[in-house]
Amino acid sequence: MSDTTLTATHHDATHAHGHGHHHADGHDPNLQHHFTEMAQQFDAAKIGMWLFLATEILLFGGLFVGFGMQQAKFPEAFKAAHHHLDWQLGALNTVVLLVSSFTMVIAVWASMTGRRKTLITNLILTLACAGTFLVVKYFEYSHKIHDGLLPGKFYSYAHGQPNEYIFFSFYFMMTGLHGIHVVLGMVAIGWILVRALKGDFGPGYYTPVDLVGLYWHLVDLIWIYLFPLLYLIS
Amino acid sequence: MSSHAHSHENDWKIYLGVLLALLTLTVITVGASRIDFGSLNVIIAVVIATVKASLVALFFMHLRHDKAINSLIFLSSLMFLSFLLILCLIDVGSRIEPKPANWKGPDKGLMSPRDLDKPATPAGTAPGMAPAPATEAPKPAAPAH
């Protein structure tokens, strides 16, 4: 293991001139003092990220369970309400997010294999996909706001079934919380992009890219469930 | 980490294949929702979504080659979520919905605010309801918003 650590350090040192310092004792400049080696630091960071993702699943899970309960209670109202959603826009956003997940995993792969240009290009592509997703969402939201299809007491749509407003409460809470995650993901990817431009990442150290990637895939994962449940069947 | 870097050179091909599989499954899930399978539609959609989610978790999130502890954390969160979901659905499915004895709305489902705005029938005629003073005028069963 010490062999690989030294190789990684050497690789990192030759690529990251921006740091301007190479520890002669073989310690990676990215290694924090409370870890004995880079691999341990990497594994610990990953466990921490997965614990965070577990809390995210439970956060969204509560909304999914609430949606399931109300859907079981008012099947007709939910069926009628979901026809107000444009499944084609939902499908477009699904494709956009899936492609962004692909560009993100390519970015992680590029940082791991030392392809700096590929890393930067794919981070920009991921940001572009996230932006596209939000633009589509903006058009969907403004259409619903115009029709008065709003959550709870703000619901002012005159036609339709009595309990349709419950569906829109869940629609806005679930897609809204997901949208906030997309925005936060863009901030995180932007931060990674700035660091990648500075040359911070290479085969010896790419933990932040990997962790932001995990977060971004979770955002995609939640949309994978949101799309069919909200747009396709109800 | 970097000790395996040489074996990851062609991983992009795997990722591209996974992306194509995910896009294909998206087309399938849209297609399946166009056909009416009754209550099976939800199950089909959730199963396809779970296949997609598994692909994302195993390949894009690297759980396939990752330390088992990360998969354990992920699966335990899903397990507790399934407890919540199953217990709540059992609750909803086995509930007896109490209705006012003067209930005139549709039998199925909970009352909506619209139904509650109907004037109540004179108390006393409805069994199981506390008899109201006869002098009191009928009032809505719920405060108007």
Image (spheres, rainbow, N blue to C red):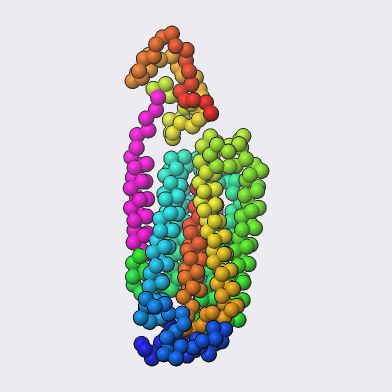
Q: Position of residue A97 (x, y in %)?
A: 56, 64
User: Which residue lies most toward the top here?
Assistant: B135
Q: Which residues are magenta?
A: B74-100
Q: Position of residue B41 (x, y in %)?
A: 47, 52
Q: Is B81 one of the magenta-colored residues? A: yes
Point 44% across, 11% down: residue: B136
Q: Which quadrant would the N terminus of chain A be assigned to in this image? A: bottom left
> Is residue A78 shown above or below A52?
above
Q: Residue A55 placed where, x, y %?
A: 40, 58
- The vertical placement of A74 against B123, above or below, is below
Give the side of residue A70 with respect to residue A83, left or right. Answer: left
Is the magenta region chiefly helix, strand or loop? helix
Q: Nearer the viewer, residue B28 or A69?
A: A69
Residue positioned 40% across, 55% down in the render: A58
Quarter of the rendering containing residue A47: bottom left
Could you tell me which residue is drawn at 54 percent across and 56 percent down? A180
The answer, for residue B39, to whether it is visible in the render is no
Which residue lies at the image location 38% right of the left edge and 17% below the top edge?
Answer: B126
